[in-house]
Image: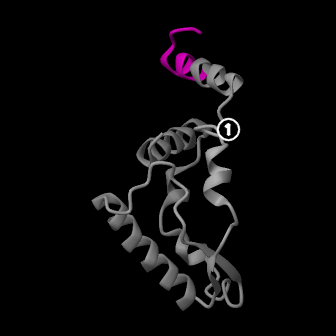
């Protein structure tokens, strides 16, 4: 599911739960602790974990620029970066995982049941 789908579903869930729209007004940033990352140790994994990631692809380069910006923001916010962290045999470990590690027959069934329930088409 893409991120727009997730946000749409969350919006629908909020409506279904009856959260008053006024409660959602304003920015969540006013609740953030400005010093929360001071001294926090954050490991930066630079090695790609995508099985089919292509560092020469235009999309990869866009993500890489955004990633670098976010890493700089973490440092500016006071985090202590361990950059890079290295996971020995990462590619080998990743090659042994399923395409979607949380996908099982049960989750596929639950997803189908949920989609049919939402659409009102039965299971």
Mostly what secondary structure, the magenta segment?
A: helix
User: In front: 99, or 15?
Assistant: 99
Task: State the residue at coordinates (60%, 38%).
Answer: 100
Q: Is residue 115 magenta?
A: yes
> On the rendered structure, is 9 left or right of 106?
left
Residue 83 vs 54, above or below: the answer is: below
> On the rendered structure, is 40 left or right of 12?
right
What SS does tag 1 mark? loop
User: In front: 79, or 98?
Assistant: 98
Q: Please state the horizontal and vertical placement of residue 86, each as a whole percent of the image.
A: 66, 72
Residue 97 found in image quarter: top right
Q: Please state the horizontal and vertical placement of residue 48, each as a whole percent of the image.
A: 52, 61
Please name the residue that numbered disc 1 is placed on. 102
Q: Residue furthest left?
A: 58
Q: Please state the horizontal and vertical placement of residue 22, each as a whole percent of the image.
A: 51, 57
User: In front: 87, or 103?
Assistant: 87
Residue 66 vs 21, above or below: the answer is: below
Residue 2 found in image quarter: top left
Residue 75 found in image quarter: bottom right
Q: Is residue 111 magenta?
A: no
Figure quadrant of the C terminus:
top right
Task: State the residue at coordinates (68%, 28%).
Answer: 104
> On the rendered structure, is 40 left or right of 17?
right
Task: State the residue at coordinates (53%, 74%).
Answer: 29
Residue 45 vs 4, above or below: the answer is: below
Q: What is the magenta range? A: 114-123
């Amino acid at each position: 599911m893409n991120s727009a789908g997730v946000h749409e579903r969350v919006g629908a869930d909020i409506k279904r739960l009856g959260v008053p729209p006024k409660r959602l007004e304003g920015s969540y940033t006013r609740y953030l602790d400005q010093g929360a990352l001071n001294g926090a140790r954050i490991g930066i994994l630079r090695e790609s974990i995508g099985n089919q990631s292509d560092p020469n692809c235009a999309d990869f380069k866009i993500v890489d620029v955004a990633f670098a910006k976010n890493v700089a923001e973490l440092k500016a916010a006071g985090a202590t970066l361990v950059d890079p962290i290295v996971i020995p045999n990462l590619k080998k470990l990743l090659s042994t995982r399923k395409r979607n590690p949380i996908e099982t027959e049960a989750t596929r069934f639950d997803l189908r049941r949920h989609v049919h329930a939402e659409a009102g088409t039965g299971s």
